[in-house]
Structure formats: structure tokens, C-alpha cells
Image: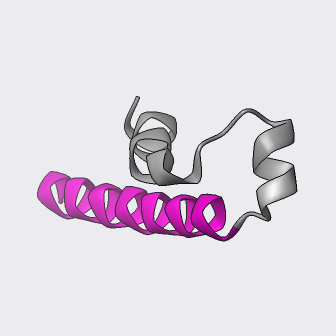
Amino acid sequence: MNIMNSVRSAMQKRALYLRTKHELEMMPLNVALDLDIYRGDAARIASRAVYG
């Protein structure tokens, strides 16, 4: 049962990572600039937000 929980957790984190990355990439440029975010760093930012 512990293995199933680990797999489920990993799948949930992956889905959250992909959603977060997509949202950052699709963010309007003016919003990204206001937040001081370079959309090219979306993968790094999403990874840090989800995985720590």
C-alpha cells in the first residue's frame, strides 16, 4: 500500500508541476513583467514551487 501512495503522490505532483508551468508560460507579458517573472524560466519556477 505504501508504494501505491508514493506513486499517487508523484503523479499528483507531476500534474501540479505541468499545470503551474503551463500557467506561467501562458501568463500575459504585462502581468509577468509586473511580477518580475521571465516566462522562459517557467520550468524552473514551477519545479521549485512544486518539489521544493
* Vertical placement of residue 18 versus 20, above or below: below
Magenta stretch: helix, strand or loop mostly: helix
In the rendering, at what x and y percent does residue 47 appear? Answer: 39, 43
- Check the picture and name the quadrant holding the N terminus: bottom left
In the rendering, at what x and y percent does residue 4 appear? Answer: 20, 64
Say left or right for 17 vs 33. left
* Vertical placement of residue 52 versus 46, above or below: above
Q: How many marks?
A: 0
* Vertical placement of residue 41 versus 52, above or below: below
Indicate whether residue 2 is drawn in magenta. Answer: yes
| Residue displayed at 39% across by 41% down | 44
Colouring scheme, one of rainbow, by chain, secondary structure, one colour: one colour
Say left or right for 26 vs 47. right
- Check the picture and name the quadrant holding the C terminus: top left
Indicate whether residue 23 is drawn in magenta. Answer: yes
In the rendering, at what x and y percent does residue 19 appear? Answer: 55, 68
In this view, the residue in front, 19 or 10, is 19
| Residue displayed at 57% across by 53% down | 39
Find the residue positioned furthest to the left: 3
- Which span of residues is magenta-colored? 1-26
| Residue displayed at 45% across by 58% down | 17
| Residue displayed at 57% across by 59% down | 20
